[in-house]
Image (tube, rainbow, N blue to C red):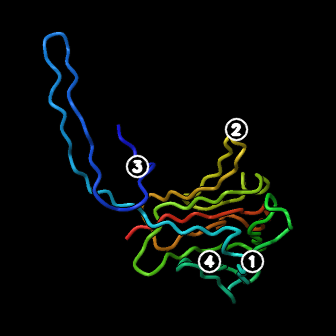
Amino acid sequence: MPTAKDITASGTVYVWYYVKADDTHSDSEIAATAIEVPVADIVVWDVTNISDLRVMGTFESYTKEGVTLSGNAERNQARWKDKGDPTRDGIQFDAKESGGFTFTAPTGKKFTKIVMTLTGPAGWANGGLGTGWAYNWDSNTDIDTVTWKGTAAASKVELLTGADYFYGTYVKSIVFYLSE
């Protein structure tokens, strides 16, 4: 089966195929089928572009490349923390009261997936992440992630809605997958 792991832009790809022979038949001719592949837009927030991230409760939200992060309660905050060590730098999410945060997609777009890479598991493995979110630790790479794959594309995705009080390890990067 072909995969789209190396496709980086929308367009036409060709799937080449043939029917393999058995004891009583010959191989078929090799043929190609053109397939239009839509590739999701990707927005990445990481050390290269979000050192100015600051969300202060319901008073101040943050927008970068059309994606907005907002707090859903007055005491919930998110900000970039530079520890001077790239392995420890990241976004600090503090939910000091229920409500969590909301990611809003750019106008005319919807999220199809959101992947946050963490500096460690603390807090995230059992943090009341919210609907559609899952924590994962890959034992082969020792990478902790929190991923949203909702049941349908969404223009708004809530995070940490089940947390009355949350303080977890930092988020090193967030990758937003968007579609029309």
Q: Where residue 154 appears, x then y in whole percent?
A: 45, 69
Question: Quick one: quadrant of the N terminus?
Answer: top left
- The residue nearer to you, when weighing 166 against 34, is 34
| SS type, badge 3 | loop
Question: Quick one: quadrant of the C terminus?
Answer: bottom left
Residue position for label 1: 77
Q: Where residue 56 appears, x then y in whole percent?
A: 73, 84
Q: Residues within 10 Å of mark 1 (few under 14, many from 20)?
A: many
Residue position for label 3: 4
Q: Residues within 10 Å of mark 3 (few under 14, many from 20)?
A: few
Residue position for label 2: 139
Residue position for label 4: 69
Q: Gap between marks 3 and 4, in whole Å?
A: 29 Å
Q: Quadrant of residue 142?
A: top right
Q: Residue furthest top?
A: 23
Would residue 116 appear left or right of 74 to someone viewing this image? left
- What residue sits 44% from the left and 81% below the top? 107
- What residue sits 55% from the left and 77% below the top? 67
- The residue nearer to you, when weighing 77 against 176, is 176
| Disc with the residue nearer the chain's start (1 vs 2) | 1
Q: Gap between marks 1 and 3, in whole Å?
A: 37 Å
